[in-house]
Image (cartoon, rainbow, N blue to C red):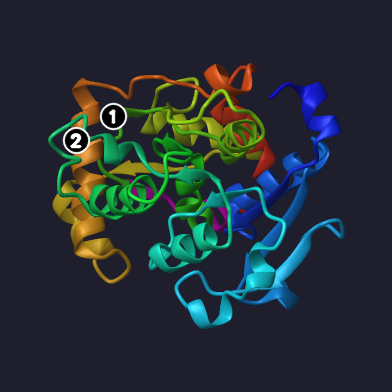
Amino acid sequence: MSSTEIRTFRPTVLVTGATGAVGRHLVTTLLARGAAVRAVTRKPEDANLPEAVEVVAGDLADASILGQHVFEGVDRAFVFPAQGIDVFLDAAIAAGVHRFTVLSSLAAAMEFPRDRGSASQLHHSAVEAAVTDRTDAWTILRPGTFANNLLEWRWQISSGAPIRAPYLASAQAPVHEYDVAEAVAETLLSDDYIGQIIPITGPQALTRTEQVATIAAAVGRQIPLIEITPDEFRSETEQFIPQPIMEMLLDYWSDTLAAPDQVRPATAVTGRPGRTLAEWATDHRADFGA
């Protein structure tokens, strides 16, 4: 569907996860491109979305509060990878929703031994299967590591405390949530991506040391950085990070020492260069106390 056709046919897109990092920018992108947007959330009163968005109450895993009004007039939906998504999908398809774009993860591709059986792979593969088992009208986006994961350092950076992290020479390609959101919008508003599975990363693979330096440049101050061992990381974070997630992270960082992330920016879908980590850091300066 061309941009001209989109202007004459105004699709109604149902957005799940609309109050999240990807969802919020997806909503504004869809509105800017002329789509009608309905957002489903458990707490509509707290959504704080643009006035043009129709916000409805609903729980993706509870059919009793996913009434017909949630889907009425909806052409297509963005599927956030929430637990219990099967309930939502059954209700959506029964109500006549016929197009879905799914937010998944590169882990679901199982390109590396570390992915197979990881917490991310198991969860996202199940979400993908829930959609592909029910319909042929799907697109799956598989982002790699999100730049937003670096917000885990916001307390240290804001307070001036040192960042203590393992595998500082490993290199990843963090993706800006805006690039993912704009790729989602394109796949929802075009017929060109039906049946495709699309990997997305940031446009640069940077070492963890370079990532910290990039944030430091954006906030305008030095950020002390100390390399620690994996065992030190385990002992310092075990009360905050579940064991399966911790091991998944350590395996990822360890693997990307010798083999940095393969760069696969959103350009193939959006037609624009992927946003750099420097751009992301500038967009998030306030999160780091700048």
N-terminal-most mark, 2 or 1 = 1
Whole-percent x, y for residue 259 in the image:
23, 21
The residue wearing badge 2 is: 254
Query: Residue at coordinates 40% horizontally, 19% vertically from top-left?
Result: 263
The residue wearing badge 1 is: 170
Residue 161 magenta: yes
Of 67 and 45, nearer the camera is 67
Of 29 and 284, nearer the camera is 29
Where does the magenta region start and end? 157-164
Q: Is residue 228 visible?
A: no
Tag 1, which secondary structure? loop
Depicted 260 relative to depicted 86: above or below: above
Residue 267: which quarter of the image? Answer: top right
Of 284 and 266, nearer the camera is 266
Residue 10 magenta: no
Q: Quadrant for the N terminus, please.
A: top right
